Amino acid sequence: MQNNIRSESARSLARVERGNLCSGCGACALIAPDKIKMEIQPPGYLRPCQTGGVTEEQDQMIAQVCPGLGQTVIAGDRPDDPLWGPYLEMHVGYATDPALRHTASSGGALSAVLVHLLKTGQVDAVVQTGAAADVPNANAAVLSRDERAVFDAAGSRYAPSAPLAALAPLLNGEGRFAFVGKPCDVAALRALAARDPRIDDRIPVMLSFFCAGVPSLTGSAAVIEALGTTLADTRAFRYRGNGWPGRATATLNNGSTLSMSYHDSWGMILSRHVQHRCKICADGTGTAADIVCADAWVSDAAGYPLFEERDGISLIVSRTEKGAAMLAAAAQAGEIQLEKFDTSNLASIQPGQTVRRRALLARLLALRCLGRATPRYRGLHLVAAARQNSPARNMRNFWGMVRRSLTR
């Protein structure tokens, strides 16, 4: 099987490209690292570029794990919410280190768990996403081996990232690692772990965060332009953090800074540049991870988040027994402050995720009526989520997707 080399494009990648379904996770580059690499393509998304023939086995593996083509969730005996997926416990909390809490995007709970894993030797390093060294608004996979490195990588990065593409050397080497990635990254890695035993040996911990979608680099360049400067004059760019929710901040070559609010940067600019695959995502909440963190937004009476600056608070979802044990140990060690969370309030503090999940079935049906490719979802309760919408709202989402697809 390994000798059955295909010289033409992999069928799996061609299917993804026809439907514009790539999430940019890099799973295909991990499966065939010598034949596929991730490259930035217009308007600024990471996409696979095939440089040589892949084997039939590799092609089939990509088709089985690619989150662009589908995702399967098996809840087992865990509570399984139609919107939020399977979980064991939900908390709100924050890092007890005030500096980490301030630097991170939403209370620093995820970073605090990583610090605990490193301090206790449960992992040798953390694979996570940080700022690229050469392009201030771009991302790169980084390997954090100590608390300082976790601190430096803290904060959301609303730009394309393909952390799975960086894992091949780690799987073939020594050590144990925690992995932090977008929900689609973790879903692909978990699916691949069922087929490649090296992953569970080398990457025993998988963490994620609630994700509203991946904007293009064109989007972040538009933020920098709206700040009144250019990418060429920008030395560093921070999307969030240094407060909650924190401001988008460009540090210029002369050392001065320019910034704008999260409401303006994400709400008015970046959210308009989110890639197509994210708009039909059934799992923005990291159902495959051990622990998932998010913003525990404070909302007004109408349920709209208030983005006034305050001390950060994280929503923390333990999805596996391993995740629940890690979180409890981090709290016991004093790295994180926790309190139980009433799950009935989740829709009100995460309205964006709520709206998208309820709208998803109508959007997928619209694409299928147009003959467009869509991911194949199993165990993600699309019908139950859609029933939480009114028929009128579902119809608006259906026709909205039809209109966008025909004019795109």
Image (cartoon, rainbow, N blue to C red):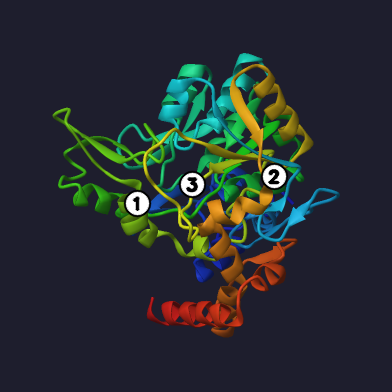
Q: Secondary structure at mark 3?
A: loop
Q: CA distance from mark 3 to mark 1?
A: 14 Å
Which mark is drawn over residue 263? Answer: 1
Question: Tag 3 or tag 2, which sits nearer the N-term?
Answer: 2
Tally the marks: 3
Residue 307 vertical position relative to residue 400 in the rendered view, above or below: above
Residue 328 vertical position relative to residue 247 in the rendered view, above or below: above
Between disc 2 and disc 3, the foreground one is 3
The C terminus: image quadrant: bottom left
Q: CA distance from mark 2 to mark 1?
A: 33 Å
Residue for point 54% across, 51% down: 349
- Are discs 2 and 1 less than 8 Å apart at CB? no
Looking at the picture, how far across and down is residue 116, in whole percent?
61, 20
Q: Do we see residue 223 in this rendering?
A: yes
Q: Which residue is mark 2?
A: 190
Q: Is residue 80 left or right of residue 126?
A: right
Q: Secondary structure at mark 2?
A: helix
Between disc 3 and disc 1, the foreground one is 3
